[in-house]
Image: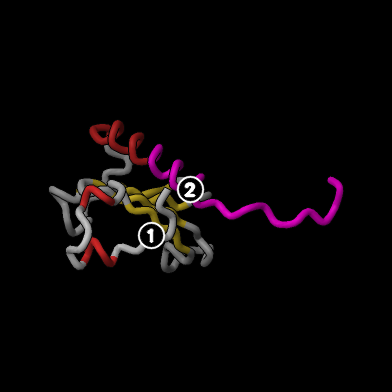
Amino acid sequence: MDVGRSLWPLLTGRAPLDSFREDIYCEFYNALSGHKDPQAHATCVRTARHKVAVYHGLGVGELYNLVTDPAETINRWDDPGYAAVKTELLIRLCDRMAWTVDPLPPRIAPW
């Protein structure tokens, strides 16, 4: 897994595109401006064709077709026509989250 690998060689043309994975993962806090929970946590995975973002604990997300909607104006999260795409992207997202999870904090009690 290429956790923390620099994209600079790709951006400057010194590395072929196929030497990198097919998606990009990111996570961030304060994901929803104006939301009642200022610490809303979100994770996102983006491929060349689609982008999905999940707002954890809120039951909402965003799904965009970047080919037909590059400005990300039409959220396909609840669109039944995108159910298979959503499932595939959520599986990718879960995989990325599993590979980048922080270790558990030190145990301070026996329970």
Is 67 positioned to the left or the right of 56 in the image? left
Q: Quadrant of the C terminus?
A: top right
- Residues 37 and 95: in front is 95
Q: Is residue 19 left or right of residue 104?
A: left
Q: Which secondary structure lies at badge 2?
A: helix
Question: Which region shows up in magenta?
Answer: 90-111
The residue drawn where x is 47% and y is 66% is: 30
Q: Is residue 70 magenta?
A: no
Q: CA distance from mark 1 to mark 2?
A: 16 Å
Q: Earlier in the sequence, mark 1 or mark 2?
A: 1
The percent position of residue 87, horizontal first and vertical second, equals 35, 34
Mark 1: few, some, or many residues within 10 Å (few <14, many ≥20)? few
What crowding class fits label 2: few (fewer than 14 Cα within 10 Å), some (14-19), or many (20 or more)?
A: some
- Identify the residue under disc 1: 5
Disc 1 vs disc 2: which is toward the camera? 1
* Residue drawn at x 48%, y 48% as measured from the top left: 97
Q: Residue under label 2, please give it.
A: 97
Q: Is residue 109 magenta?
A: yes
Closer to us: 102 or 10: 10
For the view shown, which residue lies furthest in the front direction? 14
Report the residue at 29% width, 31% height from top: 84
Q: Position of residue 9 (x, y in %)?
A: 26, 64
Q: Which secondary structure, mark 1?
A: loop
